[in-house]
Amino acid sequence: GDEHGMSDEQMQQVNEELNKQRMELAQMENLKEEEKEKAELEIQRKEQALEKEKKERETLAQQLKAMEEKLVSGSADAEAAQENEDKLRRAAIELEERKAVRLQMQQQLEEQDNIRQDQEEKFGSMQEEVQAKTKKLKKLWNKYEQVRAEVQDLEHEWQGGEEELLEGV
């Protein structure tokens, strides 16, 4: 049962009764206009009272629910508080572990980056060395070509000079 006002079933019955009265009213064409208006106003007044009752019931239900929730949350005992404290402690430990893992990964990345930079620098210095030696090699090759050309010129001159000497004899 309900301690306050009408039950849902009773409210439904009253609502149905009001609808029935309205239907009967529409059928009574022989009723005087004044009586019709008076009956219509009475039905409206009852509908408003019914709506008011419904709103009050909803408000009371919400208040009751809020009080029950307060009661339930207020009765949280030391065990629940301890459980929350344990959860917080575990979360803090997990956070520290994740932080340590992140730092370790960061150090590994930095080491890999340093290794890569060293390799790039070695590669750069090796390339520079190759370029310098290539340049030197080209220079020496050009010098060799010049000397060889001079030797050939001298051989031609010598051969030409030798022939003149032999002719002169």
Image (cartoon, helix red, strand yellow):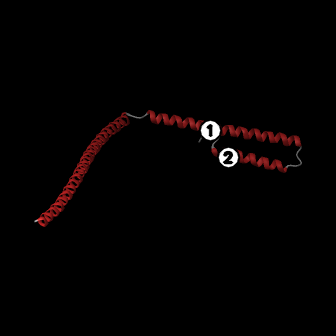
Q: Are marks 1 and 2 in contact (CB under 8 Å)?
A: no
Q: Residue furthest front?
A: 168
Asked whether 3 or 22 is in front, the reply is 22
What type is the residue that disc 2 sits on? Gln
Figure quadrant of residue 1: top right
Residue at the disc numbered 1:
57
Asked whether 139 or 31 is in front, the reply is 139
Figure quadrant of residue 47: top right
Q: CA distance from mark 1 to mark 2?
A: 14 Å
In the displayed structure image, the side of residue 80 where residue 30 appears, left or right? right
10 Å neighbourhood of mark 1: few (<14), some, or many (≥20)? some
Residue at the disc numbered 2:
12
In the displayed structure image, the side of residue 121 where residue 51 appears, left or right? right
Residue 5: tell me if it is visible.
no
Asked whether 67 or 141 is in front, the reply is 141
Q: Label 2: state its secondary structure.
A: helix
Q: Residue furthest left?
A: 169
Disc on the earlier residue, 1 or 2: 2
What type is the residue that disc 1 sits on? Arg
Percent position of residue 97, x then y = 29, 40
